[in-house]
C-alpha cells in the first residue's frame, strides 16, 4: 500500500515485481448475475488469466492472506455492514500496486469519491452491473489502455521555460496555473519539472509525492487515472504534480520509444 489504509494506488517504490504465479484477474462476487457479467465481459481483457469465485470482500480478505496477489482484484461489498473497514482490512493483505476494482450496492457520490480518491480503489460500480459498464470502466484498467477518443476530450499544454534557475519561470507558471484553475475554473495540472526542488508545490501550498518520478521511470503507466491519483489537490480544479527527490538517489529514466 502506498499509505496506511490505501488499497493499491501508488506504491512507495512505484514498482511491482513480475511473477509467473500472478493471475491477471481474480474476482470475488456474491451473486450469479454479476459473476456471469464479469466472466462474459472481461475474459478477453484478462487474456485467459482470470478466476471468478463466489464470495464477498470478507472472502477476499481471507483468501488474499494465503494466495499470491493478482494484478487486478475485484471484490464485492454488497451487503457488507462496514464496507470502508473491510476495504481497509483488504489493504493489509494485498501487495503494493495491485489494481483493486469494487462492486457494491451503495449509490452515493461521497462513498465513490472516498474509496477511489482516499483509499486507492481504482474504480467502483454499483449493482446491477451491466456488460457495457464493465467494458467501459473495468476493462481499460485491466488492459491498461485508454477508454477511447470518444470518451475523452483533449487539453492544452502551456510550457514556461527559464534560461537558468532563479529567473522566475516557476513563479510565472504557478501564477498562470492559479489563474486557469482557480480564477477561470478550468481543470488544470501544474507540473513542476524540477524533480529535486518541488518549488511549484511550495508556491501553491501543495504536497509533493512520488508520482512525477514514477511517470519518468515508467511512462507506460501514464493515463488519466494515473494523473488523477498522482497529482496533489490545491483547489477543486487545480492540482500539482511535483517531487522532492534526493540528489544522491539515482533515477532510472525510461527513454522515449523511437518515432514511427
Image (spheres, rainbow, N blue to C red):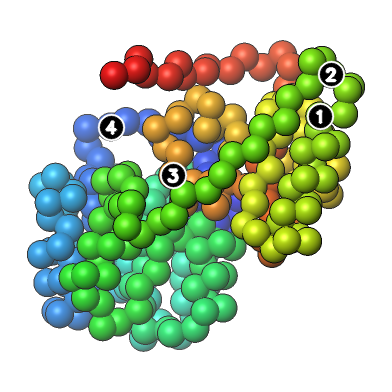
Residue at the image point whose x is 12% and y is 51% from the top: 44
Q: CA distance from mark 3 to mark 4?
A: 24 Å
Place of residue 111 in the rendered image (x, y in percent of width and height, measured from the top left): 52, 77
Q: Earlier in the sequence, mark 2 or mark 4?
A: 4
Residue at the image point whose x is 74% and y is 47% from the top: 177
- Closer to the observer: label 1 or label 2? 1
Vertical placement of residue 8 versus 118, above or below:
above
Secondary structure beneath dot 1 equals helix
Residue 169: mark in rendering: 1
- Closer to the observer: label 3 or label 4? 3
* Residue at numbered disc 4: 19
Q: Earlier in the sequence, mark 1 or mark 4?
A: 4
Secondary structure beneath dot 3 equals loop
Classify residue 116 as left or right of residue 184.
Answer: left
Classify residue 53 as left or right of residue 60.
Answer: left
Q: CA distance from mark 1 to mark 2?
A: 8 Å
* Residue at numbered disc 3: 223
- Closer to the observer: label 1 or label 4? 1
Classify residue 171 as left or right of residue 146.
Answer: right
- Closer to the observer: label 2 or label 3? 2
Q: Are marks 1 and 2 in contact (CB under 8 Å)?
A: no
* Residue at numbered disc 2: 165
Q: Earlier in the sequence, mark 1 or mark 3?
A: 1
Amino acid at each position: 500500500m502506498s499509505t496506511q489504509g490505501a488499497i493499491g494506488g501508488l506504491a512507495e517504490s512505484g514498482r511491482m515485481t513480475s511473477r509467473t504465479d500472478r493471475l491477471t484477474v481474480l474476482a470475488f462476487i456474491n451473486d450469479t448475475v454479476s459473476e456471469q457479467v464479469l466472466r462474459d465481459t472481461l475474459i478477453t481483457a484478462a487474456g485467459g488469466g482470470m478466476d471468478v469465485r463466489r464470495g464477498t470482500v470478507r472472502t477476499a480478505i481471507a483468501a488474499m492472506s494465503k494466495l499470491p496477489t493478482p494484478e487486478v482484484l475485484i471484490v464485492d461489498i454488497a451487503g457488507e455492514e462496514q464496507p470502508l473497514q473491510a476495504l481497509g482490512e483488504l489493504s493489509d493483505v494485498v501487495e503494493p500496486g495491485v489494481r483493486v476494482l469494487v462492486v457494491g450496492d451503495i449509490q452515493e457520490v461521497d462513498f465513490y469519491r472516498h474509496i477511489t480518491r482516499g483509499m486507492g480503489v481504482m474504480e467502483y460500480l454499483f449493482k446491477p452491473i451491466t456488460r457495457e459498464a464493465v467494458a467501459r470502466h473495468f476493462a481499460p484498467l485491466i488492459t491498461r489502455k485508454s477508454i477511447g477518443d470518444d470518451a475523452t476530450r483533449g487539453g492544452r499544454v502551456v510550457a514556461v521555460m527559464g534560461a537558468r534557475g532563479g529567473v522566475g519561470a516557476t513563479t510565472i507558471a504557478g501564477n498562470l496555473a492559479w489563474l486557469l484553475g482557480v480564477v477561470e475554473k478550468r481543470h488544470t495540472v501544474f507540473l513542476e519539472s524540477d524533480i529535486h526542488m518541488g518549488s511549484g508545490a511550495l508556491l501553491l501550498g501543495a504536497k509533493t509525492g512520488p508520482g512525477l518520478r514514477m511517470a519518468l521511470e515508467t511512462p507506460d503507466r501514464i493515463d488519466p487515472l494515473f494523473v488523477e491519483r498522482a497529482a496533489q489537490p490545491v483547489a477543486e480544479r487545480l492540482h500539482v504534480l511535483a517531487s522532492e527527490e534526493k540528489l544522491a538517489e539515482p533515477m532510472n529514466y525510461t527513454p522515449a520509444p523511437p518515432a514511427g
